[in-house]
Image (tube, rainbow, N blue to C red):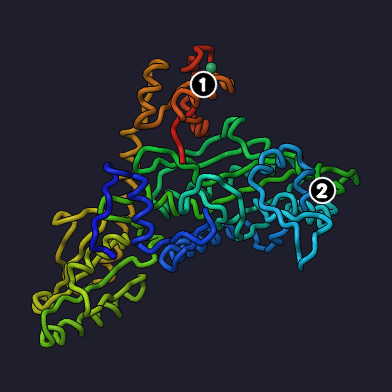
Amino acid sequence: MAEEKLPTRSENYSEWYNQLIQRAEMADYAPVRGCMVVRPYGWALWENMQQNLDKRFKETGHVNAAFPLLIPKSFLEKEKEHVEGFAPELAIVTIGGGQELEEPLVIRPTSETVIGYMYSKWIKSYRDLPVLINQWANVVRWEMRTRLFLRTLEFYWQEGHTAHATQKEAEEETLRMLDVYADFAEKEAAVPVIRGRKSATERFAGAKETYSIEAMMGDTRALQAGTSHFLGQNFAKAFDIQYLDLNNQLQHVWTTSWGLSTRFVGAIIMAHGDDQGLVLPPRLAPYQVVLIPIYKNDEERSKVMPVVEKLKAELSGFRLKVDDRSEVTPGFKFNDWELRGVPLRIEVGPKDVEKGTFAMARRDIPGRDGKSFVPQVNAARTVGDMLDQIQTGIFQKAVDFRKAHVFDPKSYDELKEVLQGGWAYSWWCGDAACEAKVKEDTKATTRNIPLDQEGGSGKCIVCGKPASEKVYFARAY
Ligand SMILES: [Zn+2]
């Protein structure tokens, strides 16, 4: 498992990523090409993410429900842009119970259509609004090029779908959920993100506006880590979702949808991981602390274990794992938990028992600098403080890394150059032709137009025409 060394990130970033996921037992390849098995350690991380997000959704007034996996194919055809966007990625069921179906069924790639259909039955009056529903589900998109967590045929996510009486309310909801994602990413996952608006080219199929959070990975590529869509009245009109307003007039509702998926697990791996393996944020890590007893013989063991038991009880408020496997050496255990990214390692040996101390080793600072010896008294407070420091430390490290790899090129040639190893933050006129040229020349796309703009105006980095907004260009996953 941990005997062979991982390829380093500079040697081969994508091999580092693929091997790390399998060796850390996060996920494995399924028999069907492009599908993924999420193993218990990976699922435990996803569960912590789910619980945290679910709490945030409920705090902002949403409730959960479950909609069907199978959707009549004709539903997708009701919204023109939606079907054009998703048609190439659809998996379609044509036979059921041994018989050819009268109407083929689509395995949901996303659920705007079936939820829109149901909303048209449920929403009758302004009193029924807003409808604020989320579902936790799996979806299928027939991707050609796949990577574990980042892009798989089937993936897990949540999709929120809301309906509102007014445009203003729906727009507010769209941005509110973008903020929920951004806050989750930064506070829980310690991944700094840019909140912004997608260009028309990069918009969700059928949306009026798409907003995203974009994160920088350890190889400087960008990853779209969550999206929130203002759908206008597109789906309301396609599915005839109408309500009677206060004046007894029929009106179409305004809808939104927003999603965050297991792709975000890939973001955590790539934003924080190092050449030794995963570095998981304490607030989401399946195990926050691993406790390793150190002894050479039974006599030492009998001294060490009571202290281990006492510490275990004292640290019961943390997600803690005691690794007392006898068939492997402490050194093996250190490497193993390092690879799996456990934020904090505690060691207790015979000397610690005598001195009333234990050793703590931070995952985010490898080697001696990250190691300290602390008293056993007040262990819970010491460990809690240390986990907070690690959480803040890895966030700051990611912020600094991004800062060091975002450039403000002065010319188009310089833009092409900086995009080889970073992001460009540049004026853009908004013309899709300029966006396409950059993609053609560099493979970089517009990531988003940040909500927090510094103001003023400038010249488009591509064509030189006047521009009123800046955009991030980057090569992306
Ligand atoms: Zn331009």
Give the answer, above or below, for where 258 lies relative to 423. Answer: below
Horizontal and vertical percent position of residue 357: 14, 72
Q: Quadrant of residue 119?
A: bottom right
Per the image, the residue denoted by label 2 is: 241
> Which disc, if any, is residue 225?
none
Horizontal and vertical percent position of residue 304: 16, 81
- Left or right of 388 in this view: 243: right
Give the answer, above or below, for where 333 lies relative to 20. Answer: below
CA separation in Å, label 1 and label 2: 40 Å
Residue sitting nearer the eye, 312 or 108: 108
- Left or right of 401 in this view: 263: right
Per the image, the residue denoted by label 1 is: 437
Q: Residue at x 34, y 56 (%)?
A: 20
- Left or right of 171 in this view: 241: right
Horizontal and vertical percent position of residue 32: 54, 58
Q: Quadrant of residue 12?
A: top left
Residue sitting nearer the eye, 317 or 43: 43
Q: Residue at x 44, y 61 (%)?
A: 28
Residue sitting nearer the eye, 455 or 113: 113
Q: Residue at x 39, y 28 (%)?
A: 419
